[in-house]
Structures are given as C-alpha cells and as structure tokens.
Amino acid sequence: MLLLTEAADPGWRATADGVPLSGHVVDGWAQGFDLPASAHHVSIRYVSSRSGWLVAQGLMVLVLVVLALPTRRRRGLGRLGDVDADTDSESDAESDAESDAESDAESDPDGDAEAHPESAVRV
C-alpha cells in the first residue's frame, strides 16, 4: 500500500509502471493507493477539477461586464411613455401661449398696455 499524507480527494491519480492504481481513503482522511509488490516506477499526480469552475466563472464575469455596458439609443425611439411626453409638452406650450395672450387681452381692455408699460401687471 502507498499512503500519501494528503487529504483524500478524487483528483489524486497514481500509476505503477503505466498501470492506473485504485485509490481509497485511509484512516478516514488520507489518500491511499493499492501498490503491487512488483512495481518499479510509481507516478503520482493531482488533477484539479478547478479548471472547469474557473472557465465558468470567467464566462459569468464576461456576461456581467457586457450587461453593465451602457447602450446607445436612437433618437426618436425612446420608451413608450417618452413619445407621449414630448407631444404633451408641445401642446402644453401652445396652450400656455394662448392662455397668456387671452389673459393679456382681459387685463387690458383698451389694448394699449404696450403704450403704458407701468400700468400692465403680470402675475
């Protein structure tokens, strides 16, 4: 038996003379391999399973960066409410101008407010 003083993990691989060895947990924590008595050359390596996780995390970060990038909007193609707001503000400006003209006419029945600016009172 070959005993490693490393924690048992499925990533440990061992070969004896090119033949894979079966691994198992020894003393509840250590990694062990069944080693034949005729083995001359033993090779032990650890194959990390983190490479898959690193690739997945990298892709996730890439997606988050792309989603965080600002987008360009074309002029005139805003949200649904934006189109109505623009037309409402134009019609509000026109109605405000008309109401100002009507209030000026009501406050100056003679029509000579421009001739006497001190008598014209605006609210």
Image (cartoon, rainbow, N blue to C red):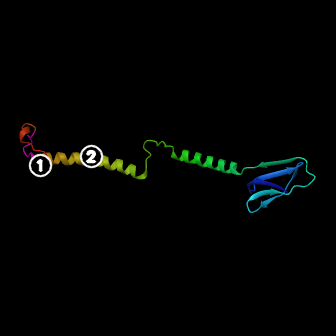
Q: Residue furthest bottom?
A: 28
Across and down, in percent, residue 65 comes to: 55, 45
| Among numbered discs 1 and 2, the one appearing first in the sequence | 2
Magenta residues span 106-113
Instruction: Between label 1 and label 2, give the one nearer the viewer.
Output: 2
Q: Quadrant of the N terminus?
A: bottom right
Across and down, in percent, residue 119 comes to: 6, 42
Kind of residue sitting beneath label 1:
Glu
**Which residue is found at the position 88% from the left and 46% from the top?**
41
Q: In this image, 42 relative to 93: left or right?
A: right
**Which residue is found at the position 42% from the left and 44% from the top?**
76
Q: Residue furthest right?
A: 38
Q: Which residue is mark 2?
A: 93
Q: Which residue is mark 1?
A: 106
Kind of residue sitting beneath label 2:
Ala
Between 39 and 93, the one nearer to me in the picture = 39
Is 109 magenta? The answer is yes
Give the class, few, some or many, for how many residues have Cα within 10 Å of label 1's Cα (few <14, many ≥20): few
Q: From the image, give the main secondary structure of the stretch colored magenta.
A: loop
Between 9 and 67, the one nearer to me in the picture = 9
How far apart marks 1 and 2 lie (CA) works out to 20 Å
Please tell me whether mark 1 sits on a helix, a strand or a loop: helix
**Which residue is found at the position 23% from the left and 47% from the top?**
96
**Which residue is found at the position 10% from the left and 44% from the top?**
121
Please tell me whether mark 2 sits on a helix, a strand or a loop: helix
